[in-house]
Image (tube, rainbow, N blue to C red):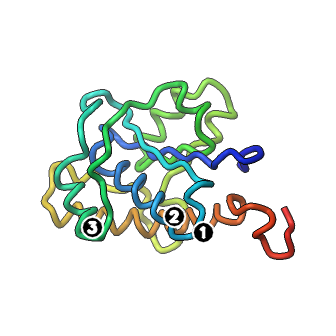
Amino acid sequence: MTPPGDAPFRVVFVCTGNICRSPMAEVVFRRLAEKAGLGDRVASTSAGTGDWHVGERADTRTIASLERRGYDGTRHRAKQFDSATFASNDLVVALDRSHARILRSWARDDAEADKISLLLDFDPTAGDAVDVPDPYYADDGMFDTVLGMIESASRALFQQLEPAIRPSAARPGGLP
């Protein structure tokens, strides 16, 4: 899953409408890359399986939850995942099993299907949890809870990917 040459590693986070969970993951993952000095080596985006919110900002509760933790989600505009999204990304991260099922049904071949993972699968502290719950019909507290889950899983994902993303000269012993 290492991108060729100087191309950044591209990851897309996918939820239902691209206004709650996936924008959180996009922003959190981008911040992790920036804090590690790898912001130019990672492209973090997000999309939804549905088209209901295309062009809209993230849910105001998403923006507020992100803001409470020091993130900026105000520039986000929702978009829908389409077949070209597979080709333009190295990793497709679904926020729950329903998204993963939909994405697998859209994959045109095994190579595209192999790019799909569940976010919580990366987090050893997630316990039995498999899906990041949708906070859309819940209160502000649930948005904060979901953001905490996303932060933990995103850190675990980033720790797994960082050795492959870091330029070879910066790796211990300069090994690729």
Cα separation, mark 1 vs mark 2, equals 13 Å
Q: Is residue 77 above or below residue 120?
A: above
Q: Nearer the viewer, residue 169 or 81?
A: 169
Provide residue 72's location: percent of width, then percent of height.
31, 58
**Amino acid beneath label 3:** Thr
Query: What is the secondary structure assignment of the residue under circle 3?
Result: helix
Give the residue number, with chain letter if any, for mark 1: 159
Q: Nearer the viewer, residue 133 or 42?
A: 42
Query: What is the secondary structure assignment of the residue under circle 2?
Result: helix
Cα separation, mark 3 vs mark 1, equals 22 Å
Q: Quadrant of residue 14?
A: top left
Of marks 3 and 1, the one in the foreground = 1
- Mark 1 neighbour density, 10 Å: few (under 14) some (14–19) many (20 or more): few
What residue do we see at 47% from left, 57% from top?
30
Of marks 3 and 2, the one in the foreground = 2
Q: Quadrant of residue 53?
A: top left
**Amino acid beneath label 2:** Glu
Give the residue number, with chain letter if any, for mark 2: 34
- Mark 2 neighbour density, 10 Å: few (under 14) some (14–19) many (20 or more): some
Q: Is residue 113 above or below residue 146?
A: above
Provide residue 109's location: percent of width, then percent of height.
66, 27
- The answer to which of marks 1 and 2 sits earlier in the sequence is 2
Q: Is residue 75 above or below residue 143?
A: above
Provide residue 98's location: percent of width, then percent of height.
40, 41
Cα separation, mark 3 vs mark 2, equals 23 Å
Give the residue number, with chain letter if any, for mark 3: 145
Residue 68 horizontal side relative to residue 83, left or right: left
